[in-house]
Image (spheres, rainbow, N blue to C red):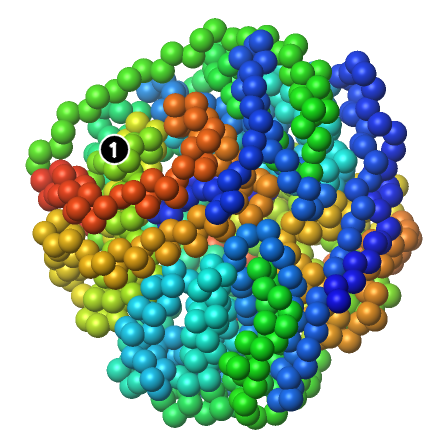
Amino acid sequence: MKKIFIIAAISLLAQGISAQTIDRSQKPKPGPAPVITIGDPVIYKLANGITVLVVENHKLPKVSASYSIDAGPITEGAKAGVVSLMGSMLNEGTTTKTKAQFDEAVDQLGADVNAGAYGGTASALTRYFEPAFMLMAESIRQPAFPAASFEKIKSQTITGLKSNEKSAKAISGRVVNALVYGKNHPNGEFQTETSINGITLDDVKSAYKKYVTPSRGYLTFVGDIKPEAAKALAEKAFGDWKGAALTLPVLAKVSNPTKTEVDVVNVSNAVQSEITVTNLLDLPLSSPDYFAVLLANQILGGGSESRLFMNLREKHGFTYGAYASTGSGRFQSKFSATAAVRNEKVDSAVVEFLKEINTIRTVKVSAEELQNAKNLYNGSFALGLENPARTAGFASSILINNLPKDFYRTYLQKLNAVTIDDVLRVAKKYFNYDNTRVIVVGKTEAFVPGLTKAGFTVNTFDSYASPIKK
Amino acid sequence: MKKRILFALAISGLCLSASAQKVQFTEFDLDNGLHVILHQDKTAPVVAVSVMYHVGSKDEDTTRTGFAHFFEHLLFEGSKNIKRGEFMKLVSSNGGQNNANTSQDRTFYYEVFPSNQLELGLWLESERMLQPVINEVGVKTQNEVVKEEKRLRIDNSPYGKFTEKIFAHLFDGHPYRWQPIGSMAHLDAAKLDEFIAFNKKYYVPNNAVLTIAGDLDIEKTKGLVKQYFAEVPKGAPVVRKEYKLPEIKKEIIDTAYDANIQIPAIFAAYRVPGMKSRESKVLGMISSILSGGGSSRLSTKMVDEKKTALQVAAFNYSLEDYGAYITLALPNKNTPLNDLLKDIDEEVLRLQTDLISESDYKKLQNQFENSYVSANSRMLGVAENLANGYTFHNKDTDDINKELSIIQSITREEIRAVAKQYLNKNQRVVLYYLPKK
């Protein structure tokens, strides 16, 4: 039933065994590479379309389940926030239990049960798993949508928005996406007090009908459970569920600026400013560039040994940490390089960010850097196996991204085949330099003069990403 | 290292450790006093190598606060055989992950590697213990980094100053009154030989526990540990000062202002016995009754029914010498802070007056068993929990296996008695935490 595939060992790390006496001046040689095994989850399909994945692991007397709906990015428009309100409302009681009764039932089991707009999770000791799982299903399938709860959630949401009004980090999160994707894009739109106030309970109910459904649903079980038992539970909880059919949205492509721009937002109380250098890219997991981009990003800013960290923190002490991340997947995503930098050093930090991005685009990385980045990925692949849910993640990623069946079994093989030239090519292709955005959210009076002096044209925005005329 | 945690936020109140199955381990001492704990688990090809030094901000001089946390940074600067800036690179370029964190009581360094790199982990940690390089360049760089960390985690962080404010009152007369991040002025004033002296005093094998957990061979690992660590010289015995604080007899009220927030908050904090005590575990259970889960008393009453609070919490910030039992609430809409405090106080009074129901007691036991089972799912967690047992529970590494049975032995009457003894208004600090205009 459960096939185990043995894949290439971490060959790069494999060498001889340790000697008797130690020579401290040399780093010890690794032992024989451990064999990495990836078990295949058992997969079933329910008649209503739900895909069921089961990873058996009896190490602890515990089972976790998650239901996940692959709806893709949802555009909310003037009702921004409706999907999140709807998700919260799924935890406010069901047609047979008030919220208080429902919470009491969950806590009595000592379990964790949650539901949201994109699905739900349940985890419990093995002996309490079935009732916990049924409660999760109940909250997903039979929400009560009480009006009093709706007012509560709305007012909490608005209070929550207010609580973040002065946070440079929160403002940066909102403004970066709004500027990069545009405010009409599902990734760029954001909730405001006005949009939340405009949402009615009927809006929430219709969002529920549209998006919470067995269509494009993945139900995953991990832990101390037999596949047959999991399948029976899945049938019992979700077998007769019907709902709207989902199709993945098709989104218009968004362009990057034609010339590098600097956009700033003033947060006068900030002691650190949030810097983001960012551009959009298209990188499906099936792209031949995928593994080279992972490595290029790692070398530039993947961790505390990467160039951005070594430069901005260890060399200059501008920041506590500087990192880069590159998105991937079926939709456009972002490359971004980020750091929270003390206000006075923002202009110098921006120069260093751009310098590092330009360098990785134009100068070949060293063989050692590339090997180190590969070793890191080989290692984290092994370390990831400590989490039994990883296998289920691989399987659903293959289904969702339409990848070849052996994508993760040959993952390291493909990663280890990346060359120095590949890294240079993809850095140039995916990390923008002349046509990127530098977004700084912080105390502008401390750094705008410096940026202007350094030759940048600076555009000013308010904390909701609307331009401010000078 | 990437995201070093300044203090261990024991905010859940459920910082339990151990799985339902007994956690097996082997332990021994080297001649230099280093205590070694080994745990074998071959489920995944992973090994965690960790060293817990029994030094934290409470061991600092009153005019040199922030030293322990500063050392957390400094001891990444390199050693006689590891060049400056190479430490982290050696970890990542060999497929590992590492980090460190500092609390008031201890500093914890670790690497997690694919299991064939065990020896590399031992080399790194033994170099750090045997011959770290502590020089002006490293001190200067890390001084800037620590200042950025303070800006990030405290100065620029909403509600980032509540522990500082509360602890100053609650632990007046004890080093817990300052935070592990310490004073930037103290760090600026410190001379290189003071750093070197601090290192000699505390970062010695007889003040450390080496814990290795994962896919390893016990006998082979014992031999390797000796090869790498036996030559580290023993330090002078570490003598810890004992503090006995006078009881707080009158409610202390203070106000903090924070430019990073819009929504105020109210805190009430009580000084309670330290983590070794049985009371500390009882207080963990009290946290669960008050704010653990949707059906907990404060959440039900204030968030769901009255809708006066955006958030409520009760947790035991448990430390070695004492703990701080903290309750807090953030208002929904514009509910006055005193109304929130009154509601919290009513629930505390109820705990002091009535026994919790049999059904609530059963719920509590199930919740604790669930978190107990989850606490040791990763090798790094196992390593840290084993080291905690030895460091903080009278050298009883097996504490990891006893926690659940202690919880099960705590009665409803005991819960009421502990609430009655420690959670009284005249014993506490009330902090009004307000937006700075």
User: For the C terminus of chain B, which image quadrant?
Assistant: bottom left
Q: As displayed, is residue B380 above or below residue A141?
A: above
Q: Residue at x 84, y 47 (%)?
A: A9
- Residue A290 appears at what percent x and percent y? 80, 62
Q: As displayed, is residue A425 above or below residue B425?
A: below
Instruction: List the residue tagged with mark 1.
Output: B273
Given residues B48 and A77, the one toward you in this image is: B48
Q: Residue at x 10, y 52 (%)?
A: B353
Q: Look at the image and tell me whether residue A320 can be seen.
A: no
Q: As displayed, is residue A75 above or below residue A376?
A: below
Q: Look at the image and tell me whether residue B336 can be seen.
A: yes
Q: State which quadrant residue A372 falls in.
A: top right
- Residue A384 appears at what percent x and percent y? 68, 51
Task: Categorize mark 1 by other alpha carbons within 10 Å: few (<14), some (14-19), many (20+).
Answer: many
Q: Residue at x 31, y 55 (%)?
A: B364
Q: Secondary structure at mark 1?
A: strand
- Residue B355 appears at what percent x and percent y? 15, 53
Please give the chain letter of the residue carrying mark 1.
B
